[in-house]
Image (cartoon, grey):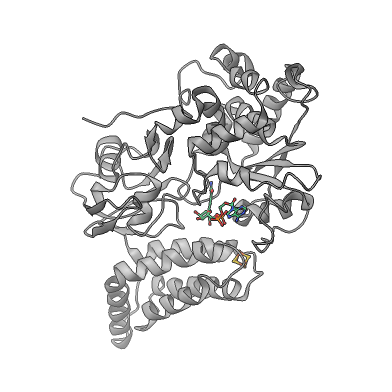
Amino acid sequence: MAPQETRLIFKHIDEEGYTNDIDCYVKNGGYEQLKKAVTMKPEDICAEVLTSGVRGRGGAGFPAGMKWKFLDRKSGKPIYLVCNADESEPGTFKDRQIIHQDPHQLIEGMMCAAFAIQAKLAFIYIRGEFFQGYKILERAIEEAREKNFLGDNILGSGYSCDIIVHRGAGAYICGEETGLIESLEGFRANPRIKPPYFPAALGAYQCPTIVNNVETLCDVKHIIEMGGEGFAKIGTPGNTGTRIWCVSGHVQKPGYYEFACSDVTLGQLIYDVCGGLKPGRKLKAVIPGGSSAKILRADERFTGKLKDGTEFDWGIEDIPMDFDSLAAVGSMSGSGGVIVMDDTTDMVEALANINYFYAHESCGQCTPCREGVPWMRKVTQRMVDGEAREEDADLLKSIADQIAGRTICAFGEAASWPVQSFIAKFKDEFVEKAKEQAARRKEGKEVAKE
Ligand code: L3W
Ligand code: SF4
């Protein structure tokens, strides 16, 4: 039997008759948690979020309550809340659904969070390409303002806060929180060095700022509803709440599925939930957390110890879908983008595609990233074009090794990890392709692009 979804954030997504206007939201219990939140002490809400153990859904999985704790409240400067809606990670498509189909859930979660951290102003930084989402949010914010769920003296609480929607202009690096802040301030989205620029201390306009992902902010509403302890009962210790898995690639039923953390294994997700692969195809590999995550090979065995000391010995299908298990097998849950590849996948072409993306998106500030990422793209492109050299696999690894850990922001790792993991796990294919192409070139035959 297919495992059951736990729809918390996606409760109303794709529900027949559910619309994204405020009346529908309120009819379904919407804004009740904000009404409750403004009667609570802000520090009590922060404590509930800490107790909930909710971890960031944007990629790094950092505990949101801890991040809020880092907020510099003594500076006397205004505090800002920023919702990171610059969803651009290849393979990830969950935040857009929330914005399109349930924008008030995000607004309610944001206002609860804003009240908790006593933000003076809140921003939604939305990916430039999400024009429809931008229009929907603008309308939803207007509706919420009319009903005094945001604006001056919210629900008579004496607390005032508004939301400004800021559109990006189509750059992946704007999703990196300090790049996002630069862009919000009107500058080129060059990421800042952390530390000292952890936004919780020095963020937007050099003021303390909390940046959270769309899904994380929606979770805040549910934490207020069920209490931190109640939320922590969903999932497992250290992996609380639900995760929305965006499954794409070679499955019969790609889409988004929400499960309590650890409630579904990778195998169940692929075969029971997504209908498996096409007839006659075999699983070759999976990238479990967006294109930046390290690839897992279908025939690998994963052994080791989890954080709590539990030993594991898993095949790819046994891996529980949660933060710690995916980290323990050497990858990450990232932003929830599960990319499934069957045995028809050409790994060189797949990596060339990923490299093309990162080479286009580097901001160019750091030399290893600015020079190295396009170099990796050049190498994989020549392999696709029939000009592969035997040393290319080693060269790719060497370039990636010299980027990771040597840059200002995590983009350096995001671009290197796919290369390092593809070469570590599929080197034979890269070498084979190079040999084949060299032999054909020697014979004077044209190497056709297949
Ligand atoms: C104050 C400290 N704050 C850490 C905060 C920090 C940040 C969070 C995590 O993201 C991931 C990558 C990809 N004082 C702090 C502190 N913080 N120590 O905690 O920080 P960090 O540095 O672990 O990660 P990060 O650089 O924020 C990197 C993912 O982002 N990514 C792509 C994401 C794409 C999407 C999407 O499309 N929806 O989210 C690209 O790299 O997974 O692991 O807030 O400030 N001492
Ligand atoms: Fe820019 Fe790349 Fe450096 Fe990040 S790692 S700051 S994207 S050049």
Q: Position of residue 213 (x, y in %)?
A: 57, 42
- Figure check: 130 above or below 146: below
Name of the residue lying farthest toward the bottom? 442
Looking at the image, which residue is at 33% across and 50% down? 308
Snapshot quadrant of residue 398: bottom left
Give the quadrant of residue 374.
bottom right
Image height check: is 411 above or below 118?
below
Q: Is residue 129 visible?
A: no
Q: Residue 125 vs residue 222: left or right? A: right
* Residue in front for this viewpoint, 441 or 332: 332
Q: Quadrant of residue 129?
A: top right
The percent coordinates of residue 202 (x first, y second) are: 73, 54
Near-viewer residue (210 or 168): 210
Quarter occupied by the C terminus: bottom left
> At 75% from the left edge and 42% from the top edge, which residue is drawn?
79
The mark total stands at 0
Front-most of 314 and 437? 314
